[in-house]
Image (cartoon, helix red, strand yellow):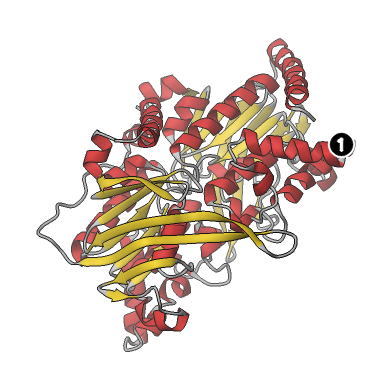
Amino acid sequence: MGKGVMENAMTQKGAAHSGTARAGSQPLLSVEDLSVSFQSEGREVKAVRNISFSVRSGETLALVGESGSGKSSAAMSVLQLLPYPTAFHPSGSIRFDGQELLGAGEAAMQNLRGGRIALIPQEPLTSLNPLHRVERQIAEAMRLHRQDIGKAEMHDRIIELLGLVGVRNPELRAKAFPHELSGGQRQRVMIAMALANEPDMLIADEPTTALDVTIQAQVLELLHDLQQRLGMAMLLITHDLGVVRKMANRVCVMTEGEVVETGDVDQVFDRPEHDYTKRLVNAEPKGQPLPLQGEPEQIIQAEDLKVWFPIKGWSGRVRDHVKAVDGVTINLRRGHTLGVVGESGSGKTTLGMALLRISRSQGKILFEGEPIHTRNTKAMRPLRDKMQIVFQDPFASLSPKMTVRQIVGEGLPIHRPHLSREEREEAVRTIIGEVGLSAAVLDRYPHEFSGGQRQRIAIARAMILRPDLVVLDEPTSALDMSVQGQIVELLRDLQARHNLTYLFISHDLKVVRTLAHDLLVMRGGKVVEQGPADKIFENPQTDYTRELLMAALELRTHAA
């Protein structure tokens, strides 16, 4: 399907939907008195308590609140995607276009899922099949609801969709497996998959969490444009108030499973009435990087570092390379924080992996004065307690078969064998408290937590060994504003007490500015600008850096 033909079909469909929506008074989605509970160890945990809301065609309703407030449980109830019968509904009704969804059969729900109602999940890596290429997965979503589309037409549509959501080299990326993409690229694939069948309603669960600010702006514009043309309703779940300001017509503020305030976005954010809403609106990471004293020792240095991935032809010969990191030189001193920013796919995470010797690389790397670029896996093991990483996707990095106690304390018997069982238990309880969780969570499993809570568990696992160097790969991307502030304060406090060194990878420039002493801006595997963070933020020297800062400023303005 050519682009013009596709856009014309979408416009016609959008006109039909818009006319229907404006002519009628009934909402497309109506949720009334909905409660969601979970059975856990013989007791009932109430996640959602008697909430009501509605969404009309062409309208965006945002559900906002802290992690664990019940936002995602309410949204997943619409598509009946909660883990039944562990999850159940003590009360409520969910009607979509007049059809009751609570209690609807699986056949009826399959007709709606991915067709009339599409979902953009929060964690793309766990939602994509690791064994199938991107094109096959998008094609599968289309084939379930579009049996009439031919193979060639489907291929053209997939390439077009990937291009629309900002995936560079869509022909090449369509042939990639999920693990070969960055977090932001995987999220864009999920958005393309959700839009493939031109749904009547889109449920977007943190749709821009993993995206850098420039792509975030592009994706939000894309969703807004498609919504206008399709008359598509949107249920938006997010902790980013800037995104809510930019996208939503109305907002429901949730805390502890209840809706405490609802109304038009401007009304709720400019004149909040509930104390919780006031705290949420005013919550934002604050503060400055720790003051530096003297000239501390270099903890890690890299010179002309390269990570090139070969592209092989049908004969097996290497015909080109993906230059993920291409000639990067850095010097990071003890107690400092180096912020690494840039678009998804720019090489930020690959750089962090190479410095830790998790990814193979070329070039010189010194850690605490010792060359490590020649060390193999076995020779690196004695250093692993000194260098730790917090991954971008906590759900994928935490074992679903281990309890929080086992996950957080896993490294202690290996790297601190002299500790007794009681001392290990005390260390686990201490670090769990430092990241804002109670000891009551220690016997629970990762699937029982919200995304933000899982990220705090991942941070605790890295910090318990008191490492010298910590690579933080988007550590706050899954967290709501107030928890972001708490984690920033925690990271700053740990750095002050233990003289920690951070390599802080992020697309959130507000958070980077509160922590980073120095800044490194990457694009296409290369460094386009680096130096003291305050100087770059105040006076960027390259067009690309200015573009990043302008996009961040726009979202901050929407949130203000």
Q: Quadrant of residue 453?
A: bottom left
Classify residue 59 by image quadrant: top right
Q: Quadrant of the N terminus?
A: top right
Residue under label 1, please give it: 149
Q: How many marks?
A: 1
Which of the pair 450/215 is nearer the observer?
215
Observer-nearest of 268 and 289: 289
**Along the line of sight, the residue nearer the viewer: 489 or 520:** 520
Mark 1 burial class by Cα count in 10 Å: few <14, some 14-19, many 20+: some
| Percent position of residue 272, x then y | 37, 26
Please say whether residue 78 is visible from this viewpoint. Answer: no
The furthest residue to the top: 23
Q: Is residue 432 above or below residue 340?
A: below
Q: Position of residue 519 (x, y in %)?
A: 29, 48
Q: Quadrant of the C terminus?
A: top left
From the viewer's perspective, tell me whether residue 185 is left or right of residue 262. right
Relative to residue 352, is residue 541 drawn left or right? left
**210 lies left or right of 528:** right
Residue for point 76% across, 26% down: 6
At a point 39% along the width and 42% down the height, the residue shown is 508
The answer, for residue 126, to whether it is visible in the render is yes
Where is 376 relative to 447, above or below?
A: below
> What x and y, as percent, mark residue 398?
52, 65
Q: Residue furthest right?
A: 148
SS of the residue under disc 1: loop
The answer to whether 306 is drawn above or below residue 401 in the figure is above
Identify which amino acid the numbered label 1 is placed on. Ile
Q: Which residue sits at x=46%, y=47%?
A: 67
Q: Position of residue 550 (x, y in %)?
A: 37, 29
Residue sitting at x 27%, y 62%: 501
